[in-house]
Image (tube, grey):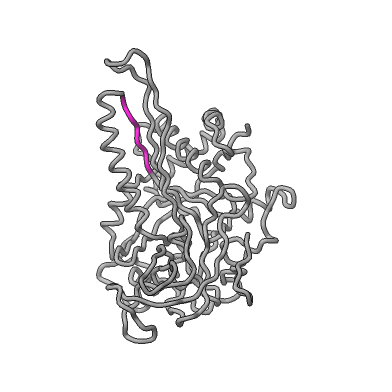
Amino acid sequence: LPSPRCANPAGPISVNGLVDYFRLLGWIHSQRLSDHPSPITSIASLSEQADASDGLQLNALLRYEADPPSSRRVRTGAWNPVGRPTDGLLAGPEIKRDDRITAASKTNDQEQGVREHGAGILSLSYIITIDQDLTRSENQLADIKLPPQEHVITCSGFLIECQDSKERILATCAHTLWQSNTILANELRHASLISTSHGERTVRSGCLARDQLGNAFMVSQVISALASADVLFFRLIKLPATPPHLQPPNQLALEEAKTDAFLVDSLVDFSSMSLEHHGALDTLASFLTLPVSPYPPPLSSPVCIPQLLNSDAGDSLFHWELGRVIEYKDTMGIKATVRTYDPLNTMIVSAVPRHGSSGGPIVNENGTVVGMIRGFQSAYDQKHAVGFGTVSERFWELFQLPGLRSASFKND
C-alpha cells in the first residue's frame, strides 16, 4: 500500500481516510508531543467556544455581493428549463467539470496549483474515537482488547471572506456541534466507568474537513456564533499532507503511515506551529470563497443547494439540486414577508437536503449565497417534506457595519 504522502487523489478524501488521518494526528501527539497540549481542538472546547462567542461581533466587515462579477459567481450548472441539476460539478466559483484535475491529464504541479485554490464548499466531520489499551482484568483469564470505535457526525460548510483582512472563515450550522458534544459527553462518562474494570479507554475528538479537490483541514477555533440562527463561524487550518486512502478501510495502511518518517516529521512540524500560533495559522489565503448577499430572493425564486453524496466512491463530493423559495418565517416560526419590516430568520425551499448537507449554502440564480441549509421538515400544510435554512442577512449580525463600530467587537 502507498504511504499517505505518495497518494495522488483525483477527487475528495473519503470519510474513512479523514478518520484515519485524525487517528494519525492523535498518535503523533501521544508519541512525539505528549508534553504539549494537543493541536487538535476537541469537540468539547469547540462547544464551549460557541457558547462563549454567541452573538459576539467580529472586528471585520462582510462585503455585500448581491450581483457579483462573473469570476465570483457560484457555478451550479442547474439553471435549465427542466430544472434538473448537472451532476458532478465542483462546488465552487468558476470551476467546471472539464477543469477537474486528474493524474492522467495534468502534471503534479498543475494539480497542486488547483488544489491550493480549493473549491469553496467543504464537508465537515466531527470525529470521536475510542481506543482501549490491552489490559488484564482481575475477573478475566485472558488479555482483551476491544477494537477501535468511532462516531462521525457529518455536515457541510462554505468559505466566506472578511472584506479588509481577507481572512477566510468557514460558515456552517451549529446543531451538528451540539449533537456531537452530547455524544462525546456520553462516551466520556462511559469511558470512566469501563476504565475501572477493563483498563484505560482513550477518547479523542475534533473536527476535520475535506473539499472536492483532495484537501484536508482542521477546525481550530469558533470565532463567532449565533445560536438563534443555527450559525457558526470557524477558523480553519489546512493540513499539510494527504491522508491515507483506505478503500475499503484497512488498519495496515494506517500502521504503515506511522512508519513514514517524512509524513510524521511534517505533521510534527505542523502540530508545533499550530500550538505556537494558538491555532491561528493563515493557511487559506489563496482559497476560493463564496459571495454572500444580504437580500432574500422573492417567493418562487429558483435556488440551488449542494447535496452531499452518500458514497465515498467516485470523484465528486456534492451535486447541485434545484428548488424554489416557498416561504419565510421569523424567529418565532411565524410567516414573514420579504421587503417589509418583518424580521426574517428561516427560508423554506422545495429542495430537500440529504444527510450531511446541513450547513451548506443556498445559492440564487445570480450565483451568490442567500442562505444556509439547516435541515428538512414536514408541515401539516405540505404534502411532502421541504428544506429550510437560515437567511444570509443574519450573518451580518456577527460583522461590523460600514462606518460603525460595535461595543462588543472581537479583537483578533
Q: Which residue occupies the foreground of this view, 60 or 276?
A: 60
- Does 394 lie within the magenta span? no
Counting from the top left corner in percent of width and height, residue 410 is at: 31, 63
Q: With 79 as the anchor, is 332 left or right in this view?
A: left
Q: Quadrant of the N terminus?
A: top right
**Visible residue check, residue 201:** yes
**What residue is at 37 percent from the left and 24 percent from the top?**
133
**Visible residue check, residue 164:** no
**What residue is at 27 percent from the left and 57 percent from the top?**
51
Q: Quadrant of the C terminus?
A: bottom left
Q: Is residue 153 above or below residue 85?
A: above
Q: Which residue occupies the foreground of this view, 286 or 71?
A: 71
Which residue ends up furthest to the bottom in the rendered image? Answer: 340
Q: Which residues are magenta?
A: 199-205
Counting from the top left corner in percent of width and height, residue 222 is at: 35, 55
Give the tally of numbered discs.
Answer: 0
Counting from the top left corner in percent of width and height, residue 340 is at: 35, 87
